[in-house]
Amino acid sequence: MVPGRTPVTTESTVATSDATSHLLPLLAQLTLEQKAAFVQGADFWATVPLPEIGVRAMTLSDGPAGVRGPRWDEREPSLNLPSGSALAASWDIDLAYRYGAAAASEARRKGVDVVLGPTINLHRSPLGGRHFECFSEDPELTAELGAAYVRGLQDNGVAATPKHYVANDSETDRFTVDVRVDERALRELYLAPFERAVEAGTWSVMSSYNSVDGVTMTENDLLETPLNSEWGFDGVVVSDWTAVRSLDAVAASQDLAMPGPAPAWGDLVAAVRDGRVSETDLDRKVLRMLLLAERVGALEGTPSVEPAPVDGVAFTREAAVEGTVLLTNDGTLPLDATTLRSVAVIGHNALEARTQGGGSATVLPEHVVSPLEGLRTALPEAAVSYEIGAVVQEGVAELPLEHLENPATGEPGLRVSFFDADGAELFTEDRRSTALVWFGGDAPIAASSSVVLETVYTPAETGEIQLGFAGANPGRVSIDGVEMLAETPQIEGTDLGAAFLNPPSSTAAVQAEAGRPLRLRAEFALSSGGPLAGALSVTLGIAPEKTDPDELIARAAAAAASADVAVIVVGTNSKVESEGYDRVDLDLPGRQDDLVRAVAATGTPTIVVVNAGSPVVLPWAGDVAAVVQGYFGGQEFGSAVAAVLTGAAEPGGRLPTTWPAALADVPVTDVTPQDGVLAYTEGIHIGYRAWLRADTAPAFPFGHGLGYTTWSWGAVQRDGDALDVTLANTGARAGKQVVQVYAERADSTVERPVRWLVGFATVRAEAGQTVTATIPLPARRFAHWSDGWQVEGGAFTLRAGASVADLPLTMEWSVGD
């Protein structure tokens, strides 16, 4: 032990008895072949059943922001919850618990036992492409919310799967990148949220694609230490899909290889018999799988927990409001709905909002409330006009269902048919969307040579449209029997997931006439083999209009000039924020910055709503009346935006990530491996810690967020190992405040951040009410890693307030006093 420091134990209690010992009799009844099959998936989403011992198949599903279920099918819609960064912006532990409970309710409705979430990797760099799916740049905020999410799921009988373990904080070369990170940063930052999830009792953890310090994660010793040996994890480590590369993963505490059967474990039985693999290692995996089956009610005699009923739509709206951050406000907000006569709503994202990021987290909601719809509903007495202003979405968007007729049934939708190499029809289905993904389900993708989509599309307007398809497969599109497009898409990059879920678009100009039906037929060639054999993604649709961008901006400015107020919704698109690739800049795509400047220049009070899951540069923020960050707010995004803008609800969010004024100011930007290696050279200094170290002012600091009332900060007082913070609502209406507590140690003998978050709490108060937040501060919050957890002797300085840059209350704190 280093002089001057005292050791501190973790907050978890490691189990002293084997949680699986009672399952040994079941294990003894299994053959080697059954055991080998049980630790691999049966298909994309299900495990192998063992009816001989009373174990049914368990279904896994993507679920960080809603539970899709085993089929990617618009006929089986899902609740589209706000994304991870939106949930984190609430800073509300109770809300995170209820979010998990809502996900559990959805999971059971869809027959899902294991939800693949939450995503608790860190926002190491704002360029991370999957930033929206993760919570925060801070390990403490991420850990507390992640643990609550886990409890909410599992208290309702559904397994959580925190992911991706570990250091999967960017997307470039994610399958092969070797992350080099020192042990202190690994323990204090990247492992910390997973440790808290284990303390919360998580039944599963997902291992990531990347390597850490030279060893791919499905074979890495980190799966055993600290996960099992130190933290007492007794659940199942499930691989990210196709992440198991060899039999070396068997000895490395990798429990379940998905999807299955896994090629890398194809000779597992033979490997046990010839001694390459220990049967003891295999048995431990089987026992953990049996324990998981028992926990989720998949083992005979162990009934599953019935989740508490949840009004999913109402909860989604509430969660979106709580995660909405008011960045700036000159007093224009909240709007007075009783006096407004006219509102100009502007922006591509106002009509076609992004409610979620791209990739495997995608769900298919039954209905999405756009900001335009939300504002028209909230302002029934006002004239609400709309202009697109600037094109944001790239590529084709699906054809509207109300303008489609299935030629086989006459119902809204389309007919989809699969054919073999001889042209024989293998399978047909009637669908209700022209944006289709098969990733599991009944369609015989692997056995088919082609798929044909047929529908009758009746345009609502006359003019030229850009008709075509998005997909990775060669395609042909014909109208009324005449071929108008034949393309073989060129895939950019090497990430199969990005190519699958965000493929390129091919279009041709078509003259449309309002009311005249067009008989559409699209045929796609299918290929066999490869890691995504049996999966398919195609969209038949229309790309945005090719109107002169200056004309679009001029039309928007004219609409704003004649309105009482202008609401512009700016945002990102699926080519900016998605699984599979990182961002190249922090700019809004297209001409959106020019659009905002032009509208603001009219003199009409201009409110900008940002529809992005991660930071974007806002160079005009000081020129508009208010800026509202709405994140990817789920299917009720538009309702939440309207409620916040009109003052029907308090903007409840605070930033879980620092927002820069320019990319050049960001301290940590490197997400691109060099010679296969991505080095975390910044150590423990990421996010606001790095900004403070660099002494650079961001556009908006970590924890920032305004409300519609005012607060006075009273006093801080110690109560054992907790801090009481007293504050008062000095405004005229009820409000929410997020009390944030940071520690400092200016005279430390070890390297430290300038300050770091040690605790937080949300409080609500009526006008004039004084409230007290009690924030637990266990010793571990002050510990650093040095061959074990250590707490430096002496006093720490605590600062409490409303953001990392607004901390009016101070006191000294000695650990253990």
Image: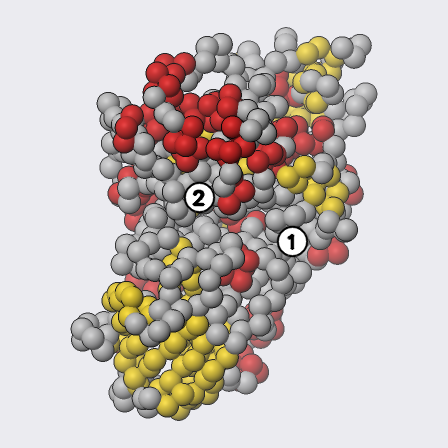
Q: Where's the N terminus, which quadrant?
A: top right
Q: In the image, what residue occupies the spot 59% across and 57% down? A: 495
- Residue at left 34%, top 64%? 373
Residue occupying the point 32% across, 60% down: 443
Q: In the rendered view, tell whether residue 108 sits above or below residue 127.
A: above
Q: Nearer the viewer, residue 17 or 92?
A: 17
Quarter of the rendering containing residue 40: top left
The foreground one among 608 and 69 is 69
Q: Which mark is residue 265?
A: none
Identify the residue position indicated by label 1 in the image. 172
Side of 317 relative to 771 (left or right): left
Image vertical order of residue 741 relative to residue 711, above or below: above
Residue hosting label 2: 261
| Viewer-nearest residue: 754 or 106 | 106
- Per the model, the C-alpha gap separating discs 1 and 2 is 27 Å
Q: Secondary structure at mark 2?
A: loop
